[in-house]
Amino acid sequence: MAIVLALVMPSVRAPAWAQTGLAPTTGWYITPSLRLSESFDSNIFASSSGQQSDFITRISPGLEGGYHTAPFTLTASGGFESDIFAKNPQLDDATMGWHAGLNGEYLPVRSLTLGLNVNYTETKSLPTLTQGLVTLNVLNPLNPANTVQFGIQRATLLSALSSAAYQFTPSTAGTSAFSYTHSTLQGGATNSVYATQLGLSHRFTSVDTGTLTYLISVFESPGFPTEVVNTPMIGWIRQFTSNTTLTFSGGPSFAEGSVFPAVNAQLTHQFKVFDTVASVLLGYTYSQGIVIGQAGLENTQTGVASISLEPIRALKVGLGVTAARYESPTGTTNPTITTYGVGIGATYQILRWLSVGARYTFTYQEQSGGNIPRSVVSVALDVTYPVRADQ
């Protein structure tokens, strides 16, 4: 659920090239970055009772470098976080978390695109893990991982994806991908997921595109039997107008003698508000995946509504509302977890290399053993300065 909030709202940190307004040109480049943030967390230990709040100062240096040409792109990135707690200095940690990533794309021929994405995140911070999941969801459409509320516990998330896309004709394309996802949570369960996906899309008219997808996922968690899920899906993309698009796909998921639905529906619409364009998103998904720290396969449902706009130049604002439900077919400590959330955020580009942002999120998690409310307010300053490395 927190992932959806991060996806539908403008992030305090934008991608390096988006922040600076520059696009990577041919050749080598390197992008150092630094984020300074101050947050107030109303429930740092994610407790259902006796909540403790704190102010957290976070320092996050990072580095990204890569090589870009028309047929080949390779990017490596990494960084770490240092946290300082105002009320709980015993929690201060110079390496609260760190992350690393490697992304590549190669076009050996005009109609064939090969891709590779590897990302690793290790952290004690829920917002950091959430941002890592956002990155994986953008880069890895097979990523099955979700997260719910947790306190200051070390979590790890590793994801690797290899993909290939081939344009058979101007109207027909095929895709294939294989992914591996591995997650751990201190005091919680370990999960591994292997997934293979084959897809075919065909544009029937200028506004209608049909899709066929077959997904095989293998879920492994110590102490639980290995589960294999087969999911054939048929989909449709309808471009009602230049500003309105409906995407829908669905089918059955077959898992160990049981059948569950698999649904992905999304409606996007753009409209003018005064002198700016606003974007609206409505979405619903029902799928099988994992919840970090929870053992075994989970049936996940998520609904989201959001709006984002740029009321004045360089200022982006957004509002998002979500609801999610995670159910374990095999039964765990928390067989059903339901979460609700609302978030509002804004970013302002002061200079090409300097931006400031603010965000507020409220989440409420219902589960056996007590419900968990949590509010987080944060402000951040980002410095990002890309330079050419071959000059």
Image (cartoon, grey):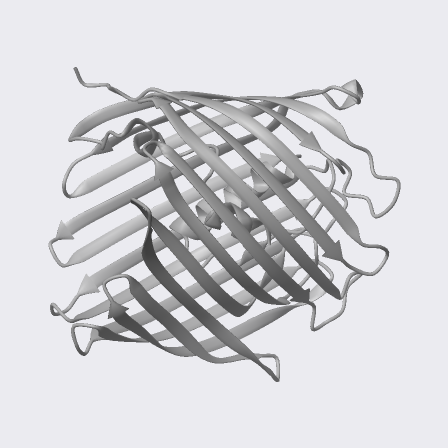
Could you tell whether 252 is left or right of 367 in the image?
Answer: left
Q: Position of residue 197 (x, y in %)?
A: 39, 67
Could you tell whether 240 is left or right of 182 in the image?
Answer: left
Q: Quadrant of residue 14?
A: top left
Residue at left 37%, top 39%?
Answer: 311
Question: Where is 31 relative to 324, above or below?
Answer: above
Question: Where is 262 relative to 90, above or below?
Answer: below
Q: Position of residue 120 (x, y in %)?
A: 50, 39
User: Which of 132 and 187 lies nearest the eye of the viewer?
Assistant: 132
User: Which of 293 and 323 lies nearest the eye of the viewer?
Assistant: 323
Residue at left 67%, top 51%?
Answer: 148
Question: Where is 391 relative to 335, above or below?
Answer: above
Residue at left 76%, top 38%?
Answer: 43
Question: Where is 271 relative to 134, above or below?
Answer: below
User: Which of 380 and 210 lies nearest the eye of the viewer?
Assistant: 380
User: Which of 163 and 307 lies nearest the eye of the viewer?
Assistant: 307
**Residue 211 visible in the current orientation:** yes
**Residue 15 visible in the current orientation:** no
Residue at the top extreme of this rendering: 391
Q: Quadrant of the C terminus?
A: top left
Could you tell whether 241 is left or right of 6 in the image?
Answer: left
Q: Quadrant of the N terminus?
A: bottom right
Q: Position of residue 341 (x, y in %)?
A: 63, 52
Q: How many marks?
A: 0
Residue at the right extreme of this rendering: 50
Residue at left 75%, top 36%?
Answer: 42
Q: Quadrant of residue 239?
A: bottom left
Q: Position of residue 244 (x, y in %)?
A: 31, 65
